[in-house]
Image (cartoon, rainbow, N blue to C red):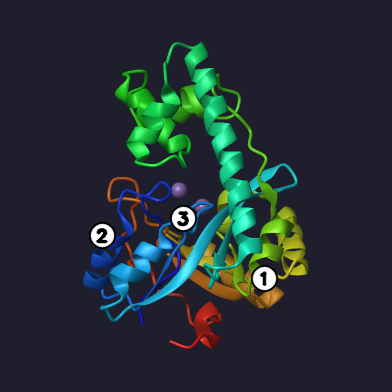
Amino acid sequence: MIVDLHCHSTFSDGAHSPETLITMATKAGIDALALTDHDSLAGLNALHQAASDKPIRIINGIEFSTRWKKYELHIIGLNIPLDDSTFSAIVIKQRNSRQQRALEISRKLDAVGVENAYDKACQIAGHEHVARPHFAKVLLNEGRVKDLQSGFDRYLGRGKPAYVPTSWITVEEAVSAIVAAGGQAVIAHPLKYSLTRTKLRELINDFKGAGGIGIEVISGETMDSQIAELVKLCNRFELLASTGSDFHSEKTSQTKLGQQRPLPLNCKPIWTEWTF
Ligand code: MN
Ligand code: MN
Ligand code: MN
């Protein structure tokens, strides 16, 4: 069974519409797909519609940007109901934080001579939920940088002229909201935050304390040694294993939709208790 529980559409920073993702998923033989746009559920209706006549199971997902101590971490929510007003309120709060940050980034870019960056970023995105990659594209289009990464290195990254910290919800808030809505909370790509092993264990304890039940064992390109370490954490902390491509686009993602490596057998897939 091919399961991909982590990908992005044009409703966040992915290159493809939900409709195109379904076409791609069908071609790739994916049995179950979760769309996990950053802080947004907005692409899910279109995804369900596009999948309605296809033999593919859709899981409502989201990838929350969260704060834990001084770190910015991603928490994935799976099986989120789309009509839960309490959950929607948190999503709106996150959207407002993102919007505030976008406007502030735009003001800072204006100060260094890049005009109307917010409007330009919205145009690139095709909507108003713009993120830093969209601003990086603006900088590229304006000839300010030679590639998207330089946009972060020279303007948008921490300590650079257009850096703006965001007031994301905490890990505990995100996990509680997901659990209260009846979903499952998963730590996305746990080894990508440069946490010491002690800090990572501390995070997992806090995460479990709030009701979190899973970690991503495979997330896009994941090395053997990392997979082994993550499986160990699953077993030690009795966590379920999630897996996903974290596909954004052909250009930026090495792993295509549903093409991430299979989960090892010595961990328990998060979908074990779901009905397919
Ligand atoms: Mn992304
Ligand atoms: Mn992420
Ligand atoms: Mn992601």
Sequence order check: which comes first, mark 1 or mark 2?
A: 2
For badge 3, the amino acid type reads: Asp
Residue type, numbered disc 1: Val
Write the residue at 59% across / 59% down: 88
Query: In the rendering, at what x and y percent does residue 64 appear?
Result: 58, 54
Q: x, y (%) of residue 49?
A: 32, 69
Q: Quadrant of residue 70?
A: top right
Instruction: Look at mark 2 in the image and give the residue it sits on.
Output: 20
Kindly identify the amino acid type of the residue bearing the numbered disc 2.
Thr
Residue drawn where x is 36% and y is 82% of the image: 1
Residue 179 is marked as: 1
Depth check: 37 or 212 in front?
A: 37
Q: Nearer the viewer, residue 197 or 250?
A: 250
User: For mark 3, what is the residue?
Assistant: 37
Assign a secondary structure to mark 2: helix
Residue 194 seen anywhere in this rendered image of the structure = no
* CA distance for labels 1 and 2: 30 Å
Q: In the drawing, does residue 70 fall left or right of residue 217?
A: right
Identify which residue is drawn at 56% across, 22% down: 160
Who is closer to the viewer here, 253 or 196?
A: 253
